[in-house]
Amino acid sequence: MHWQDSPPHKAINFGAAFGLPDSPTMFRVSILRVPESDSLPTAFAEFWRRVLTEGPEQCSDAWTVLLVQMNLLGGGFTCVFTGTDLHGDEPPVFKFSSTALEAECYALPECEPGDPQWEADYQALEDRCLEQLVAATKLEPIAGYLAALRERRAFATIVCDFDRTKQWPLKL
């Protein structure tokens, strides 16, 4: 596995079509690329290490939520520091991209849109991924990093779907 870091750049303004102004905030994106041969539990621990040790120091104090945005079709998820309304993300952005997760997601049987069996299979895959992600926070040194951050500030941990319409707590 390896980290791929981008230089700071402006975020894409998806609201431009609706007349929303560009944000002047410069974002750095760090992607943990995990090949199929690497252990997912080890990769999740490495992901949390970087999020918890580098992320908060690079953010302003405006964030109140550590958000995990699922995208298993893209191989994983994105983690951002944001506000309670899940808008106003703070740089940096951390992404997790696993070829094994992506392959497992695309291996689900093709079904018609809205098929309940596909949705149940996808949900089972997402739940398994989240269980492993949470399990990584229970082991040292990640548990210590998380505890130290919680001592410095209060924040919620939330999971959401790709377009942030569904959200639920992530119990870390």
Image: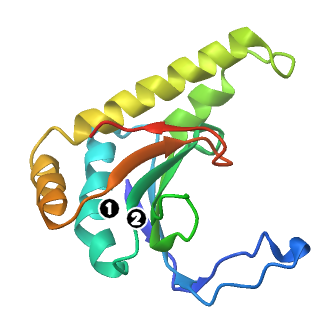
Mark 1 residue element: helix
Compared to residue 103, the image places residue 46 above or below, namely below
Q: Quadrant of the C terminus?
A: top left
Q: Is residue 8 left or right of residue 136?
A: right
Kindly give the residue lying farthest to the right in the view shown. 17
Q: Earlier in the sequence, mark 1 or mark 2?
A: 2
Q: Is residue 75 left or right of residue 36?
A: right
Could you say where residue 19 lies in the image, as x and y percent from the top left?
Answer: 87, 79
CB-based contact (under 8 Å), mark 1 and mark 2: no
Q: Which residue is at a point 37% across and 81% down the rendered structure image?
A: 60
As shown in the figure, which amino acid type bears the numbered disc 2? Trp
Residue pointed to by mark 1: 51
Front residue of 132/32: it is 132
Compared to residue 145, the image places residue 137 above or below, namely above
Q: Is residue 74 left or right of residue 116?
A: left
Q: Which residue is at a point 31% across and 36% down the rendered structure image?
A: 171
Front residue of 113/108: it is 113
Local crowd size for mark 1, using a 10 Å CA cut-off: few (<14), some (14–19), many (≥20): many
Q: Which residue is at a point 37% across and 78% down the rendered structure image?
A: 59
As shown in the figure, which amino acid type bears the numbered disc 1? Val
